[in-house]
Image (cartoon, rainbow, N blue to C red):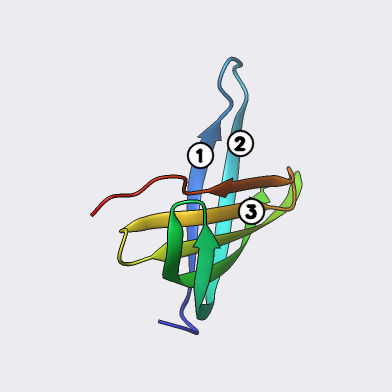
């Protein structure tokens, strides 16, 4: 629901190396809005998150979770300038 907040701590292992990082995600459901992606239009919860690399800084991320799909249909990371969108979906 809009306004919900939560935190989650986890371990991130970098693929292809022995580097292990502790991370802490702090998230808030900011809105329920219509989002357009190549797979179509969906009503989705926009989740704004700070994904902290403990001792290394914070990654700002936004997720759009569509209950109809049961998954994230769009994702954006300002840290890495990554933008992912759902391309195909069938019911």
x 56%, y 57%: residue = 25
Report which residue position mark 3 lands on: 76
Report which residue position mark 2 lands on: 21
**Precedes in sequence: disc 2 or disc 3:** 2
Describe the element under mark 1 as helix, strand or loop. strand
Report which residue position mark 1 lands on: 11
Quote the CA–CA distance across marks 2 and 3. 21 Å
CB contact under 8 Å: marks 2 and 1? yes
x 31%, y 58%: residue = 70
**Precedes in sequence: disc 2 or disc 1:** 1
Quarter of the image containing the N terminus? Answer: bottom left
Front-most of residues 34 and 53: 34
Residue 41 location in percent, x, y? 45, 66
Q: Residue furthest bottom?
A: 3
Describe the element under mark 3 as helix, strand or loop. strand
Quote the CA–CA distance across marks 2 and 1. 6 Å
CB contact under 8 Å: marks 3 and 1? no
Front-most of residues 56 and 68: 68
Residue 91 location in percent, x, y? 23, 55
């Amino acid at each position: 629901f809009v306004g919900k907040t939560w935190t989650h701590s986890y371990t991130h292992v970098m693929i292809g190396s022995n580097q292990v990082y502790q991370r802490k995600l702090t998230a808030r459901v900011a809105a329920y809005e219509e989002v357009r992606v190549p797979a179509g239009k969906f009503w989705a919860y926009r989740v704004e998150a700070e994904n902290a690399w403990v001792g290394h800084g914070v990654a700002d991320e936004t997720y759009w979770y569509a209950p109809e799909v049961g998954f994230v249909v769009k994702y954006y990371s300002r840290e890495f300038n990554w933008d992912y969108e759902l391309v195909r979906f069938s019911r």
